[in-house]
């Protein structure tokens, strides 16, 4: 790049995530104080993937939820981290 043209940076906009990955964080729609972290995924014998989630700060509080439930805004909302 010739001098004097400045620096060009490619800016990428983040698309909303449509799936679930280990490490993703969710809150219950009706209880926004507790954060649930995805710790495991099971694809096995289920027609829909299932995930184990653990309450942040209370690792003994565990739940197994389907991807359908985690992505349904009636039940859970993804915690979006600031870039």
Image (tube, rainbow, N blue to C red):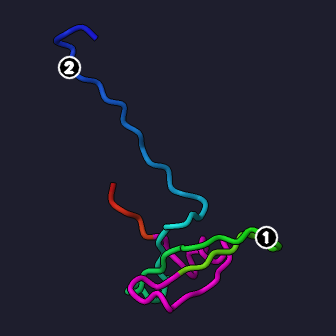
Image quadrant where one finds the C terminus: bottom left
Question: Which stretch did the figure color magenta?
Answer: 54-78
C-alpha gap between disc 1 and disc 2: 53 Å
Front residue of this view, candidates 50 and 67 = 50
Task: Sort mark 1 into few (<14), some (14-19) or many (20+) by Cα contacts within 10 Å.
Answer: few
For the point 51% across and 82% down, the residue is 54
Query: On the picture, is 57 further left or further right than 66?
Result: left
Residue 61: x and y in percent read 51, 91
Judging from the image, what secondary structure is the residue with disc 1 in? loop
Outermost residue on the top side: it is: 2
Q: Position of residue 14 (x, y in %)?
A: 44, 48
Quadrant including the N terminus: top left
> Of helix, strand and loop, which one carries label 2?
loop
Corner quadrant of residue 31: bottom left
Q: Which mark is residue 6?
A: 2
- Foreground mark, 1 or 2, reads 1
Q: Are marks 1 and 2 in contact (CB under 8 Å)?
A: no
The residue beneath circle 1 is 44
């Amino acid at each position: 790049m010739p001098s004097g043209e400045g620096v060009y940076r490619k800016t990428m906009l983040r698309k909303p995530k449509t799936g679930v990955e280990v490490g993703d964080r969710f809150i219950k729609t009706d209880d926004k104080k507790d954060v649930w972290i995805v710790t495991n995924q099971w694809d096995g014998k289920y027609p829909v993937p299932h995930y184990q989630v653990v309450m942040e700060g209370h690792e003994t509080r565990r739940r197994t939820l389907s991807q359908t439930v985690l992505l349904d805004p009636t039940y859970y909302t993804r915690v979006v981290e600031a870039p």
